[in-house]
Image (cartoon, grey):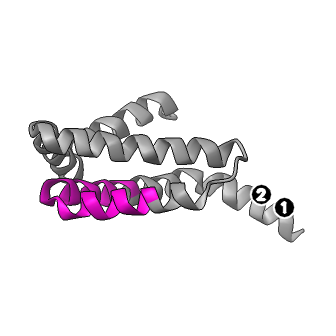
Amino acid sequence: MMANLYDVAYDLEKAIRESDEFKTLLQMYNEVNGDPSAKTMFENFRNVQLELQQKQMSGQEISQEEVEKAQQMVALVQQHASISKLMETEQRMSMLIGELNKIIMKPLEELYGSMEQN
């Protein structure tokens, strides 16, 4: 009997939540949020990131001043040990999710890849 895809997806969600990678991410996230100055700094950084992403997605040009502001924010948060560790952990988690996405999308890639070859 074929497994219900939603059941498999929920099992994957549970496995992610129970993974060492996610537990480390949660620990680092809680550490940053437990430090008021780190939390504020991190929230400001995220807000700048989101603003730039929204501008990019809507086709608006990002000014040199905005680029410089973002670079300054990156330099600032990278100097904070807890935020820096959180960002590294986020990056590893993002890579893991990307790898899982490749696995999930493989049947479609094979299907459409084979169609392109014909």
Q: Is residue 76 left or right of residue 5?
A: left
Callout 1 touching callout 2 (CB < 8 Å): yes
Q: Is residue 111 left or right of residue 20?
A: right
Q: Which mark is residue 112?
A: 2
Magenta span contains residue 28: no
Residue furthest to the right in view is 118
Task: Identify which residue is drawn at 59% across, 57% down.
Answer: 106
Magenta residue span: 69-94
Q: Secondary structure at mark 1?
A: helix
Instruction: Bin the neighbour count of mark 2 within 10 Å (Cα to Cα): few under 14, some 14-19, many 20 and up.
Output: few
Q: Label 1 sits on what residue type? A: Met
Task: Identify which residue is drawn at 40% across, 60% down.
Answer: 95
Quadrant location of residue 41? top left
Q: Residue 88 placed where, x, y %?
A: 27, 61
Q: Viewer-proximal residue, 3 or 76?
A: 76
Q: Is residue 42 left or right of residue 46?
A: left
Q: Residue 75 placed where, x, y %?
A: 31, 65
Magenta span contains residue 75: yes
Q: Viewer-proximal residue, 102 or 21?
A: 21
Identify the residue position indicated by label 1 in the image. Answer: 115
**For the image shown, how many numbered marks are present on the structure?**
2
Answer whether residue 4 is visible to the viewer in this image. Answer: no
